[in-house]
Image (cartoon, rainbow, N blue to C red):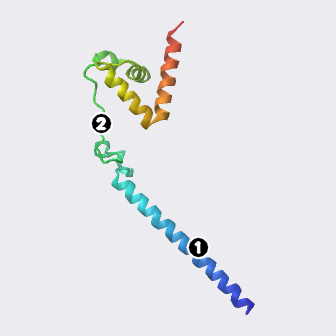
Amino acid sequence: MRTVLVVLGIWAGVAFALVGVWVLIVKMARRNNDRREAGYARDAVSAPSRRSAPGGELIRQASTPSDAGDERIDMPPAQAVVRAWTEPSQDPRKHAEAQLAVREAIPDLAYALDRLAAESQHRRTP
C-alpha cells in the first residue's frame, strides 16, 4: 500500500510539472504572438519602415531636418543630439512639448540626454 502511494505521489508530481510547463509554453506563445502583431518581430530590424509601435502607429524613418541646414549634418552625432535636445529650432513651444513627451514616455532617455547636454556644456566652459 505504501508503495502504491509513493508511485501515485510521483505520478501526481510529474503530472503537475507537465501541466505547469504546458501553461508556461502557452503563455509564452501568446506573448510572442502579441509581440509579433505589435511589430516587435525579429525581422523588424531589417525592415524598420514596416515596424509599428504598440499602439499600432507606423514608425517612420527619421528624415534629415530641413531647417537644420548643412551645419548639423556635418557635426559629430553626439553634438548633434545635444543641440537637438537643448536648442529649439522654429517653434520653442513644440520643442518643449516634445521634451516633455520624451520625459514622460522614456525617462531614462531624457535623463541620459540631460546628462549628455550637461557634460557637453561643462566641456565648453573654460
Q: Which mark is residue 61?
A: 2
Horizontal and vertical percent position of residue 75: 38, 18
- The x, y position of residue 19, in whole percent, is 53, 74
Residue 17, disc: 1
What residue is at 47 percent from the left and 26 percent from the top? 113
The x and y percentages for residue 67 are 26, 19
Name of the residue lying farthest toward the bottom: 1
Please name the amino acid that badge 1 sits on: Ala
Please identify the residue farthest to the top as the structure is shown. Answer: 126
Instruction: Tell me the mark number nearer the camera, choosing from 1 and 2.
Output: 1
Task: Tell me which amino acid carries mark 2.
Answer: Gln
Q: Which of 85 and 98 is in front in this view?
A: 98
Residue 41 or 8: which is nearer the viewer? 8
The residue drawn where x is 52% and y is 19% is 119
**Quadrant of the image containing the N terminus:** bottom right
**Which sits in the foreground, 107 or 97?**
97
Question: Extreme left residue here?
Answer: 66
Looking at the image, residue 123 lies above or below residue 44: above
Tag 2 secondary structure: loop
Q: Quadrant of the C terminus?
A: top right
Residue 99 position (above or below residue 44): above
User: Mark 1 or 2 closer to N-term?
Assistant: 1
Q: In the image shown, does 70 or 2 lie closer to the viewer?
A: 2
3D distance between C-alphas at marks 1 and 2: 46 Å
Classify residue 62 by image quadrant: top left
Indicate the secondary structure of the residue bearing disc 1: helix
> Dot 2 surroundings within 10 Å: few (below 14), some, or many (20 or more)?
few
**Residue occupying the point 50% across, 71% down:** 22
Residue 115 placement (x, y as % from top left): 52, 24
